[in-house]
Amino acid sequence: MNSQLSTLNSQLRLTFLGTGTSQGVPMIGCDCAVCRSPDPRDQRLRSSIYVETPECAWVVDTGTDFRTQALRENIRRLDAVVFTHSHTDHIMGFDDLRRYSHDLGSIPVYASAETMRDLARVYEFAFNGLNRFPGYLIPVPHIVDGPFQLGGTTITPLPVPHGKSTVNGYLFTRGERKLVAYLSDCSAVPDPIAAKIGEVEVLIIDALRHKPHPTHLSVAQALEVAAKVRPGQTLFTHICHELSQSSETELPANVGIAYDGLKLSL
Ligand SMILES: [Zn+2]
Ligand SMILES: [Zn+2]
Ligand SMILES: [Zn+2]
């Protein structure tokens, strides 16, 4: 076991690898105030989190910026990867898992049946193994259709609508503690899901911008979900260039806007 992780004082450490929407912030060719903001927290790579526990570490999603994020955070250990859904901003860094797969011999991949089907189609060369270069990525698929364990953490899928599709958020529980609910892409949070994550310590939730959007929650909608869930703390993610980090001051006291590189120790 990595000595750094075995001496981890917290039950779970979470790093925001990216907090941006599918186009990232700044957006290509945009001169708006947020895209030109001098606040480095307004620069957002595609949404993903890295989670470390005393037993193991994983990422949720490997988006387009995964390589950049892994280098920035110096990620040396990765025991598994968990996917929310197969939109390009969440899967296009998959190929860079080869570094970790090479160290482990293979890498466990957790995703819904639908997302796994898409991954196996897009990355057929990795999944079918017919012409695999020695040391190349060997994904080991695990279909998520209910709660599963990674070390001492129970990971419960939270199916939520994302426009017309359904994607998985995830709840991370250790012992009696509901530590984190991660809902990066959703247009609604049905009541049974809100009840399941009730009073979670940290709610990380999609809040694209103030204006409503067909596939993402707005700030007002995300605040409504938070009012139902009553988490200890709420952090917004999957932010677009219409929401500045500085607008955080207008939010309730226990609600914030996450930014790339932000770390939580729980
Ligand atoms: Zn997304
Ligand atoms: Zn802009
Ligand atoms: Zn999406």
Image (cartoon, rainbow, N blue to C red):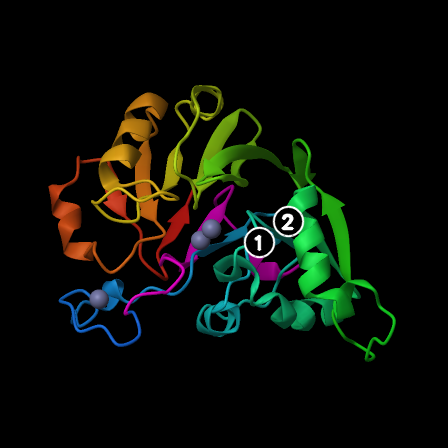
> In the displayed structure, does residue 77 sit left or right of residue 225?
right
Contact, mark 2 vs mark 1 (Cβ under 8 Å) = yes
Q: Secondary structure at mark 1?
A: loop
| Foreground residue among 167 and 201 | 167
Residue positioned 22% across, 35% down in the render: 220
Question: Residue 154 at x, y = what percent?
Answer: 62, 34
Question: Tag 2: residue type?
Answer: Thr
Q: Is mark 2 within 8 Å of ligand 3?
A: no
Residue that numbered label 1 is attached to: 86
Closer to us: 136 or 264: 136
Split into 4 quadrants, where in the image is the N terminus? bottom right
Label 1 neighbour load within 10 Å: few <14, some 14-19, many 20+: many
Residue 16 is labelled as none
Above or below residue 161? Residue 176 is above
Is 33 in the magenta? Answer: no
Q: Which residue is mark 2?
A: 115
> Horizontal and vertical percent for residue 224?
27, 28
Is residue 117 shown left or right of residue 27?
A: right
Q: Residue 208 at what x, y percent from top left?
A: 30, 49
Question: Which segment did they paint magenta?
Answer: 1-26
Q: Is residue 223 left or right of residue 129?
A: left
Q: Main secondary structure of the magenta part?
A: loop
Give 212 or 193, whichever is nearer the viewer.
212
Does the magenta portion include 14? yes
Residue farthest bottom in this picture: 133
Q: CA distance from mark 2 to mark 1?
A: 5 Å
